[in-house]
């Protein structure tokens, strides 16, 4: 049995919730607002990664790196 802080906290807060989550493996349904938030966060995370990738490529080009090498790096980063 794996014991973690979150499991202990869950049990102390609500033993029935602990039972549903960790023993019965029942996952609660997600409210539409929560799902929308998760989607929004994933979109923002993707945009951030793309912007970071573009900044790295721009810096390499400014440093005079070989364009073909930069494109290979772009494929690796993506």
Image (cartoon, grey):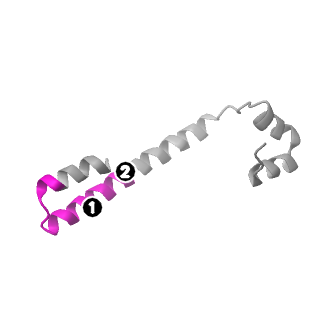
- Across and down, in percent, residue 19 comes to 83, 36
Seen in the picture, residue 4 relative to 35 is either above or below; the reply is below
Residue holding disc 1: 56
Region of the chain picked out in magenta, as a range: 48-69
Residue 3, image x and y in percent? 78, 49
Q: Is residue 58 toward the left or the right of residue 78 in the image?
A: left
Left or right: residue 16 compared with residue 21: right
Q: Could you tell me residue 56's position as x and y percent?
A: 27, 61
User: Which residue sits at x=57%, y=37%?
Assistant: 35
For the N terminus, the quadrant is top right
**Residue receiving disc 2:** 47
The label nearer to you, 1 versus 2, is 1
- 9 falls in the magenta region: no
Residue visible at 43% across and 45% down in the picture: 43
Would residue 43 be found to the left or right of residue 67 on screen?
Answer: right
Q: Nearest the camera: 36 or 27?
A: 27
């Amino acid at each position: 049995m794996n014991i973690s802080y979150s499991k202990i906290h869950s049990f102390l807060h609500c033993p029935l919730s602990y039972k549903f989550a960790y023993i019965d493996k029942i996952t609660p349904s997600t409210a539409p607002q929560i799902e929308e938030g998760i989607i929004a966060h994933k979109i923002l995370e993707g945009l951030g990664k793309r912007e970071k990738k573009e900044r790295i490529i721009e810096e390499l080009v400014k440093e005079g790196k070989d364009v073909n090498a930069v494109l290979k790096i772009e494929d690796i980063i993506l």
